[in-house]
């Protein structure tokens, strides 16, 4: 179990910044950048990465809660069953 947690921690720390947008966002950002407003592009990229991370974070939290409830349920079982 400890090995798995270390692997997950290692993979989380290896996050590489991504710069991907849909075609509409990309064209809008290119127009803004050419007009001298580069700050909007950074904000859009950060928002996309934030939205990308949320489902993984939700699954991680649900998995942790499930693990803790299973562990507590096993602890509360009588010794003859466990």
Image (spheres, rainbow, N blue to C red):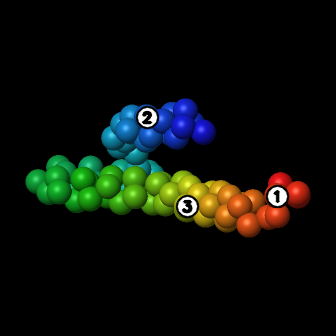
* The quadrant where residue 48 appears: bottom left
Per the image, label 3 sits on a secondary structure element best described as: helix
> Is residue 55 visible in the rendered structure shown here?
no
Where does label 2 land, which residue?
10
Image point (17%, 57%), residue name: 39
Describe residue 29's horizontal placement relative to residue 71 as left or right. left
Q: Residues within 10 Å of mark 3 (few under 14, many from 20)?
A: few
Q: Number of labelled discs? A: 3
Image point (45%, 60%), residue name: 51
> Which residue occupies the extreme left position in the image?
36
Q: Tell me, for residue 79, which label it has, or none.
A: 1
Q: Look at the picture and state if 75 lies above or below 1.
A: below
Describe residue 40's horizontal placement relative to residue 16 as left or right. left
Counting from the top left corner in percent of width and height, residue 63 is at 63, 57
Q: Quadrant of the N terminus?
A: top right
| Disc 3 to disc 1: CB gap under 8 Å | no
> Is residue 9 visible in the rendered structure shown here?
yes
Q: Residues within 10 Å of mark 2 (few under 14, many from 20)?
A: few
Describe residue 35's horizontal placement relative to residue 76 as left or right. left
Q: In this rendered view, identify the residue nearer to me: 54 or 2.
A: 2
Where does label 3 land, which residue?
61
> Which residue occupies the extreme right position in the image?
81
Q: In this rendered view, identify the residue nearer to me: 49 or 60.
A: 60
Q: Tell me, for residue 29, which label it has, or none.
A: none
């Amino acid at each position: 179990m400890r090995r798995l947690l270390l692997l997950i921690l290692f993979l989380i720390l290896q996050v590489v910044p991504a710069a991907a947008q849909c075609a509409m966002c990309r064209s809008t950002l290119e127009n803004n950048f050419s007009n001298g407003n580069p700050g909007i592009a950074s904000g859009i990229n950060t928002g996309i990465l934030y939205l990308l991370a949320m489902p993984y974070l939700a699954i991680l939290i649900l998995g942790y809660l499930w693990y803790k409830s299973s562990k507590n349920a096993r602890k509360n079982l009588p010794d003859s069953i466990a």
